[in-house]
Amino acid sequence: MSSEDNAVGLLVGHPVASRLFEAGRRLRQWDADHRWVLDTAVVLVIFLLFATPDLFPGRHRPDGPITFTVRPPVQMVLLQSALILPLWWRRRFPLAAFYTVLAVFVAEWTAGIMMRADVAVLAGVYSLVLHGRLRRVPWAVPGLAVAVVLVVIRLSGVVPVWDALFFLASVGTAAVALAFAIRIRRAQLAALRERAVQLEIERDQRSRLATATERARVAREMHDVVGHSLSVIITLADGGRFAADTAPERGKEALRLIGETGRTSLGELRRMLGVLRERTDESSLSPQPRVADLDALCRHIRAAGPRVDYQSGGALDALDVGVQMAAYRIAQEALTNALKHAGPDTRIHLAVRTEGARLLITVRDTGPPAGGRPIPATGEGHGVLGMRERAAMYGGTVTAGPEPGGGWLVAAALDLAGPDSAGPQSADPELADRQPADPQLADPQLADPQLADPGEPA
């Protein structure tokens, strides 16, 4: 956000400015609903200030060389009304009102009549510049030129020509400049109000996008934690049930592992959901999972039955925290899917290594002993979409599919040198407003339907 936007935001947020904006808005609304009030007031003020003195010439005798025309009161009222009354339409039809006033003015001066109410011409010029279309303002120049020439000719006998021209140019320029200044100021205020509304809309949009992003992140985390834990628990429960009669000790061990896995998952869920509360006990929060935690993850998977081989290579501990968490979640999802679909008798090979500016994650299982791994009827599940979403945050890709000789392969490659390598743990607040790359995760309601039924294919 630029310094100008910051200044506008501070001005809009100030209480005094807010009250002034609100008062101005109400005044404009009232004037829009009662336009005749201000128009009538302008006509009355001009009549009282400039027309009344001509109705009582004995009380207002001029001392200069210019003498105003004295006519019977009825004629004066008619002439003054012809000059002033068209100003009542000055805002709705500025050009027509101006030319009407100018026509009456030229007719009067041609007949040798001069009145104080002739100031209505200046009011017409001011209204034309302020309320009329700018491209129509030049249309008033020919009429004004005729009026100026007529006035100079009439006053040439008592006032020097250059003095008359200077006076007329001064008052005309003052009326035009005042109208332009007010028009520009109104345009600036309108732009400021529009910008304030736009800033409010952008603020609400950023808030909604940040909320949607956070909900999608929490949904992914809950899917990883709940899906992994439930898969391990279900496998252990099935194994313990079969071993209860033949090997009671193994059944007890399965129950112990189920309790341990459930308590660990419950603690992770509490820590994850605790950050969404306004007040959080920081001492109860543990760091996010990293690559170093993959050993413990493999032990959990081994406890459910599969044989897991884990290999790592490269400076994994030096990676960014966000990259390590993404790598852990991708490996966790792939291992959980292998346990869920290939069964407890499969063999899983997990490899995590750095290769140049890339982080490579490979999870390969041998499939169930009875045959190939079934592919979900609806295609790739939401677990694969979640892995691809995490990899896309770091400019990476995820491929998943059956192996030619049986089994299943998940391969992920994360870009460690891309512009997004800082990940969601970066201090840049602008990343909080970034929408998820996968459209199914952009809607919080569709963030991860896997949570509805952990038994569905991921």
Image: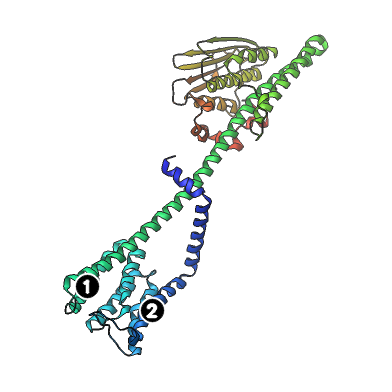
What secondary structure is found at the residue carrying circle 1? helix
| Residue at 54% from the left image edge and 23% from the top image edge | 322
Q: Position of residue 129 (x, y in %)?
A: 32, 64
Sequence-wise, the earlier of marks 2 and 1 is 2
| Residue at 35% from the left image edge and 64% from the top image edge | 130
Q: Amino acid at mark 2?
A: Phe
Q: Nearer the viewer, residue 50 or 425?
A: 50
Residue 47 has which mark? Answer: 2
Q: Nearer the viewer, residue 211 or 3?
A: 3
Q: Position of residue 303 (x, y in %)?
A: 70, 12
Residue 354 has which mark? Answer: none
What secondary structure is found at the residue carrying circle 2? helix
Rendered image quadrant of residue 155: bottom left
Name the image quarter holding the C terminus: top right
Q: Is residue 353 visible?
A: yes
Name the image quarter holding the N terminus: top left
